[in-house]
Amino acid sequence: MEQLASMSVIEALASAEETDPTALEPTLYESIDPDALDALVQSATRSMTLEFTHGDYLVRIDESASVTVTPTDDRLAETV
C-alpha cells in the first residue's frame, strides 16, 4: 500500500526541520486540508504537479507522488 501524500509531506517537512513529525509546527492542516490533498493525489488520472506553501517552505508533489520541500529562503531542498 502506498503512503498517503499527506504523510509524505509531513515526513519531508519534519526532515527539513530536523524534528519529529508529531512536533511539526505549524501543522499541515493550517496550510492545506490533508484529506483533500490525499484525495486529489489519489484520483489524479493524468500528469500533474501540485504546489503550496507551508510555513517557510514550498511543497511540491509531482506526477509520481514524489514530494519536494524547498525552503523559501533558498536553503537546500529535501526530497522523499
Image (cartoon, rainbow, N blue to C red):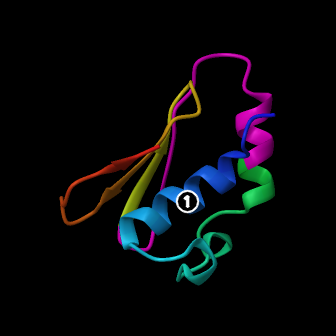
Q: Is 30 left, or right, of 79 in this rendering?
A: right
The image position of residue 70, as x and y in percent, is: 32, 54
Task: Examine the rendering and report whether any part of residue 53 can be seen.
Answer: no
Q: Is 38 left, or right, of 46 in this rendering?
A: right
Q: Is residue 20 above or below residue 34?
A: below
Q: Residue at x 55, y 59 (%)?
A: 11
Extreme residue in the top direction: 46
The image position of residue 14, as x and y in percent, is: 48, 68
Q: Residue at x 75, y 35 (%)?
A: 2
Amino acid type indicated by mark 1: Glu
The N terminus - image quarter: top right
Tally of numbered tags = 1
Assess disc 1: are there few (<14), some (14-19) or many (≥20) residues with their C-alpha within 10 Å of its C-alpha: some
Q: Residue at x 77, y 33 (%)?
A: 42
Q: Of 49 and 69, which appears nearest the observer?
A: 69
Q: Is residue 13 above or below residue 70?
A: below
Q: Is 21 left, or right, of 13 in this rendering?
A: right
The image position of residue 12, as x and y in percent, is: 48, 56
The image position of residue 25, as x and y in percent, is: 53, 83
Q: Identify the residue position indicated by label 1 in the image.
A: 11
Q: Residue 24 falls in which quadrant of the image?
A: bottom right
Q: Magenta residues?
A: 38-56
